[in-house]
Image (cartoon, rainbow, N blue to C red):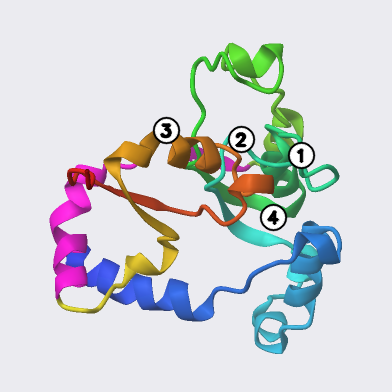
Amino acid sequence: MISWPEIITVVLPLVVSNAVAIDFTAGDPVDQIKDMRAKNRKMQQALRPGEEKMAGVNCAIDAVGYQAVSSDNPEKEDSMQTIRQISELINPTGAIGLIGVYFDEDPGGADKHAKKGEFVFPLGALWNKGVSIGQGQAPVKQYNVYLRDLIIAGRAKPSFIVSHRLPLSRAVEAYAHFDKRGMGSGQEWTKVLLKPQPDAA
């Protein structure tokens, strides 16, 4: 049986080296992904007779959550944009993992439904395709030691996402920028490390 450290060791390099970013400004992301898959000769040759219609993906992960930014208007949130795109892209009998954040209530939510943790979900499209959905918070404590050891060994370098290292006294400013979610004054604030060091007098 394969252990989690082995799985993480194998999967992390694959995820990093084979990931293909989709530029939302270059067109509809669903169409872009389907087009890329159609041009993938190895994938097309692996299809069995009758599977030619499987133009989408067999599994998808929503790692964004309800604070997804609208591709039509980046100044606004569109809570279900990612889920709608997945419902178009997922193949019949595919599987979806919802690991993005979906709070049961958020006073600052984009609309009255988001404030109460209610979301208009494309359930009919997913049900019609027989899609399986799994969800929940990641059991992070289960993997902390494994991930720490990968970092210590130099096999994983998550620090590339850190954009700012600030003293604790600038936490309010950091959260204000980070809360912009990649827009305007928060555009460059991807991950902030706060250091509880005393400020210089």
Per the image, label 3 sits on a secondary structure element best described as helix
Magenta residues, as a range?
Answer: 131-152
Residue under the image location 49 percent in, 34 percent down: 101
Using the numbered discs, state the Cα–Cα distance from disc 1 to disc 4 in whole angstroms.
31 Å
**Quick one: quadrant of the C terminus?**
top left
Q: Nearer the viewer, mark 1 or mark 4?
A: 1
Name which residue type carries label 4: Asn
Q: Along the polypeptide, which appears first: circle 3 or circle 2?
A: 2
User: Hey, which quadrant is residue 198 in on the image?
Assistant: top left
Residue hosting label 2: 67
Please tell me the numbered disc located at residue 91.
4
Q: Nearer the viewer, mark 3 or mark 2?
A: 3
State if disc 4 and disc 3 touch (CB < 8 Å): no
Residue under the image location 84 percent in, 66 percent down: 26
User: Hey, which quadrant is residue 80 in on the image?
Assistant: top right
Q: Is residue 68 left or right of residue 50?
A: left
Please tell me the numbered disc located at residue 75.
1
Residue hosting label 3: 172
Q: Along the polypeptide, which appears first: circle 2 or circle 1?
A: 2
- 115 in relation to 78, above or below: above
Per the image, label 2 sits on a secondary structure element best described as loop
State if disc 2 and disc 4 touch (CB < 8 Å): no
Q: Nearer the viewer, mark 2 or mark 1?
A: 1
The verdict on residue 151 being magenta is yes
Q: Residues within 10 Å of mark 4 (few under 14, many from 20)?
A: many
